[in-house]
Amino acid sequence: MKLPRGVTEGVARDLVLELPTDIQSIDRAVDFVMSRCTSCEVQARRLNLNFRVGLTEALSNAMLYGNAHDPSKNVVVEISMNDGHLKATVKDQGSGFDPGSVPDPTRPENLMRPCGRGLFLMRQLLDEVWYNDRGNEVTLVLRLDSGGAFEGGAEA
Amino acid sequence: MSFQVSKSGDVSLVEVEGQLIVGNRQELKQQVLEQLEGGDRKFVIDFANTGYIDSSGLGVLVSLSKKIREQGGELRLSSLNEDLRTLFELTKLDTLFRITDNKAQALEGF
């Protein structure tokens, strides 16, 4: 069987994690995912900055806002590499939200707000970011053949 | 994450080691707020040994800066690596803080 581009034998192409709603688990989970992605062809910086930040923010949002800190609810993360893409899907058990309702945190009137930057960073750093209709599942895509470290910029 | 707190004249220097993220941001916030309540007004937070700050960590820095300013003080940041600088630039928080290349520059003339 031919392995997808950028994947070496012995490296998992698909990974599924189910995490409890515990913000202390985020760092460890992201480290684990990153350790499984080291063999892909994404430049190290795009992987370690763009993808790491995007995944961390998606998990934070899922636990803090989606599941509203409820420890009885879980977050499911699916990582896959195919067709020249590294893709992460993060799904919470909340009622969902409207991503279009999040104000631009870089506007002068929002600059002093302590929150509201997670979705912005995801959109800046990943090539594609989209939500399901309910708004409780976000998909992040980093193209394996993209250029510089910050050439993300998903449509808002 | 851990941090070391020291004083240089009347400036409080907080050196962060490790990532400032959603899981630990409150520890740093509590530390700085306690010093603010104790009368300190000049703060430098140094990130020479920090690889990554997430949006919650950025939010805590914004919140601290606001509270310190309200008391007539200032929070400066130093030693951001290239990735951290990028995060500050993307979010335009580089316009909110005085950011220096190293802690010595931050302390200079404070």
Image (cartoon, rainbow, N blue to C red):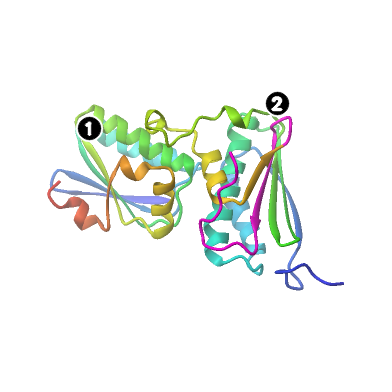
Reading the image, the residue beneath label 2 is A95
* Residue count near mark 2 (Cα–Cα under 10 Å), binned few <14, some 14–19, many ≥20: few
Q: What residue type is labelled 2?
A: Ser
**Do callouts 1 and 2 point to residues on the same chain?**
no
Q: In which quarter of the image is residue B25?
A: top left
Residue A116 vertical placement versus A52 (above, below): above
Q: Residue at horizontal 71%, vertical 62%?
A: A84
Q: Residue at horizontal 18%, vertical 45%?
A: B11
Q: Residue at horizontal 31%, vertical 42%?
A: B95
Q: What residue type is labelled 1?
A: Gly
Q: In this view, does A41 lie to the left or right of B79?
A: right
Residue B62 vertical placement versus B14 (above, below): above
Reading the image, the residue beneath label 1 is B38
Picture coordinates of residue B32 (x, y %)? 31, 38
Q: In this view, does A28 lie to the left or right of B31?
A: right
Kindly report the distance in space between the C-alpha atoms of the residues bearing marks 1 and 2.
43 Å
Q: Which of A102 and B43 is in front in this view?
A: A102
State which chain disc 2 sits on.
Answer: A
Q: Which of A136 and A98 is in front in this view?
A: A98
Is any part of residue A58 visible from this angle?
yes
Q: What segment carries the magenta color?
A: A132-156
Residue A68 vertical placement versus A51 (above, below): above
Residue A143 on the magenta span? yes
* Residue count near mark 1 (Cα–Cα under 10 Å), binned few <14, some 14–19, many ≥20: few
Considering the numbered disc 1 on the image, is that residue within a helix, a strand or a loop? loop
